[in-house]
Amino acid sequence: MPATTEKDRTDGFSAEERAAMKARAAELRAEGRKGAKKADGLQALLDAIAAMTPEDRALAERVHVTVTAAAPDLAPRTWYGMPAFADDDAKVVLAFKNAGKFGQRYSTLEFQDPARLDDGDMWAVSFALVAWTPEVEEKVAALVGAAVS
């Protein structure tokens, strides 16, 4: 049995995953505060978008505008360091995962359990985004509208 060295061992999480978990811990601490949580959430979302690559930032900005227009009652915030939108119970309905966050080839718009997209026994909850077009905007607006209906 070969001896393992400290270099061979890993905790199973990449640096990006550890950063996301730290961001989530900070979000949970911030949620415990009273007062201007909604304003803090919006600022955190805008800061997360600003830290993205130009390509990811362009998509995230359009997602933010579209979600805000389609579902103004959703509260902007971050979730694991990603731009997200939560319902009145502070449960995340959808989040934008940018391609650069985990080295993926496309960004995704991901709907969580509170989203009402149910369609029979199986339905999509994650959608790849590679470019923003009027058609994409229309589809995103329809999905968000359905998710909060």
Image (tube, grey):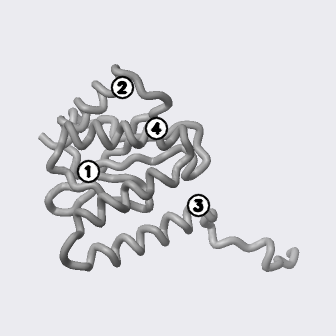
The residue mark sitting in front, 2 or 3, is 2
In front of the other: 109 or 1: 109
Q: Which residue position is annotated with label 1?
A: 93
At x 34%, y 21%, the residue is 134
Q: Give amino acid for label 4.
A: Ala
- The residue that disc 3 covers is 16
Quadrant, the C terminus: top left
Give the crowd class for mark 3: few <14, some 14-19, many >=20 residues within 10 Å. Answer: few
Residue position for label 4: 58
Q: Residue furthest top?
A: 135
Point out which mark residue 136 bears.
Answer: 2
Q: Specify which label sits upstream in the sequence, 3 or 1.
A: 3
Q: How packed is label 4: few (under 14 Cα within 10 Å), some, or many (20 or more)? A: some
Q: State the image coordinates of residue 42 (x, y, percent, origin top left).
A: 30, 58
Q: Amino acid at mark 1?
A: Val
Mark 3 and mark 4: span between their CA atoms?
A: 21 Å
User: Residue at 14% of width from left, 50% of height from top?
Assistant: 73
Q: Quadrant of the N terminus?
A: bottom right
CB atoms at circles 3 and 1 under 8 Å apart? no
Residue 14: % across, % down: 63, 63
Disc 2 marks which amino acid? Val
Estimate the x, y position of residue 136 in percent, counting from the top left: 36, 25
Q: Is residue 132 left or right of residue 66?
A: right
Callout 2: SS: helix
Mark 2 and mark 4: Cα distance apart in space: 13 Å
- Around disc 1, counting alpha carbons within 10 Å, would you say few (fewer than 14), some (14 to 19), or many (20 or more)? many
129 or 55: which is nearer to us?
55
Work out whether 15 lies above or below 25. above
